[in-house]
Amino acid sequence: MDLPDVACVRQSVPQPELADPAEAVRTCILESRIRERIPAGGSVAVGVGSRGIAGIAGMARAAVDTLKELGFRPFIVAAMGSHGGATADGQRELLAGYGVTEPAMGVPVKTDMDSVILGTNPVGLPIHFDRNAHQADGIVLLNRVKPHTDFHATYESGVLKMMVIGLGKREGATQVHRLGLRGMKEVLPAVGRFLVQNTRFALGLAILENARDRTAEVVPVEPEALLETEPKLLDRARELMGRLPFDQIDVLIVGELGKNYSGAGMDPNVIGRLMVETQSDFERPAVTRLCVLDVSDESHGNIVGVGFADLTTERLVAKTDPTPFRINVLTSCFLERARVPIALPTDRAVIESAVETCWKLDPQAARLVVIPNTLELETIWVSRAFEDEVKAHPHLKRLTEYGPLPINSEGRLDQVSLFPHSTQARRARSLGQFAPAGHS
């Protein structure tokens, strides 16, 4: 098939960005009231999760160093619910993938899955909480605040969710998720309010990221202000997040999905597909045919979110580790997103099938977009059908002429040449693989 030619387009929406996020973390802790909440020399559990926050290792190290400076005894605790196959080793491996290790942090990293029951939630189920965090003299949670991938509500992804689900371990995550949307919208805030009052939560460090996946702000959140402050931070995060600049797309090609890009593998706020039972998809963008070509190494075989796609590769499916995938999906209680779509042998076969079935008689007229993942959206590739919209958009600039997609003789799309600054390209360089200079 004669696939549509594509050109590189850059989104240049003005974005705030911190020059030194680690120093911002240090300042937030020093200017907080944490010394009033934790006894001198006390132990402090620093919660770190599995969401692939940019620069998380540096910020976590800044947090533990600053706590040491204040005379406390910090340690890292895994705050990621059932991720990593709901095992201590799996969660340790996930943290290590982000550079959060005992040698790098200079403190213990505790990933035990043991929890204690602190009370009962509004529907009569037990409230679980990480045993290590509960036994500490204080708790500091370091997490990104952003729109959630499963629902819209007053509280979505953030410090409150990390406390309830992240530190709830597998049992706590299950108790909230098993109630579906009611659990996320009603039970989560109620349990969060209970935990603020009944644990030694001492400080939240809320991270806001811009559309370039870089730290825009770090905001200290005192316990008594968490429930009031986090919704405002969520509104701010929604303004900052990256999006696709088009309302309608015939074919969307996603280079790879992954837990490091979104808890859902692919962010529904970007692709426009929610795929939650009984709920409608988002109004924009409307995508006729969605393809995903690979899964990130950082996901360790968890292909959650593959069900968003209409087509995928046999390569992606072969990388599946069924245990973490199954546990994550069953814990989330959103099963629709786990359905494996039609899998074809090569990237070319996937892309050709998508164009053939996107309801356009002329392939060159197809509105085709290529992105590396749903997090890194500053540079995208688009077909000629978008030319007028690109010209009219104040924050879009076409950087190249139109040309064929770089697909090699084995039918593989060269993502590194398309996106030389992406996670995929950085990974290829770290592995010593050739990464040619691209257009972006």
Image (spheres, helix red, strand yellow):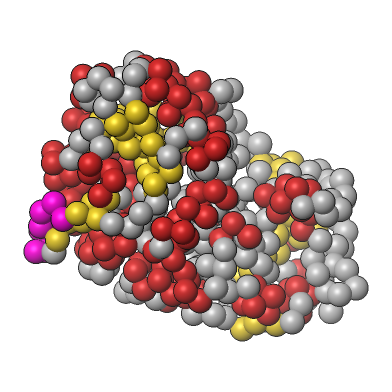
- Residue nearest the observer in this picture, 139 or 238: 139
Q: Where does the image place residue 418, in percent across and percent down from the top left? A: 79, 53
Q: Quick check: 88 left or right of 6? A: left
Q: Decide if residue 283 is in sight here.
A: no
Which residue is depicted at the point 24% across and 55% down?
115
Which residue is depicted at the point 31% across and 32% down?
44
Which residue is depicted at the point 85% across and 67% down?
407
User: Eyeballing the image, is 328 above or below 222?
Assistant: below
Q: Where does the image place residue 128, in percent across and percent down from the top left? A: 21, 56
Q: Where does the image place residue 94, in percent across and percent down from the top left? A: 51, 54
Q: Which residues are magenta?
A: 117-124
User: Quadrant of the rendered structure where residue 384 is?
Assistant: bottom right
Q: In the image as oriented, which residue stretches furthest toward the right?
A: 409
Please tell me whether residue 130 belongs to the stretch shown in magenta.
no
Viewport quadrant of the N terminus: bottom right
- Residue nearest the observer in this picture, 192 or 154: 192
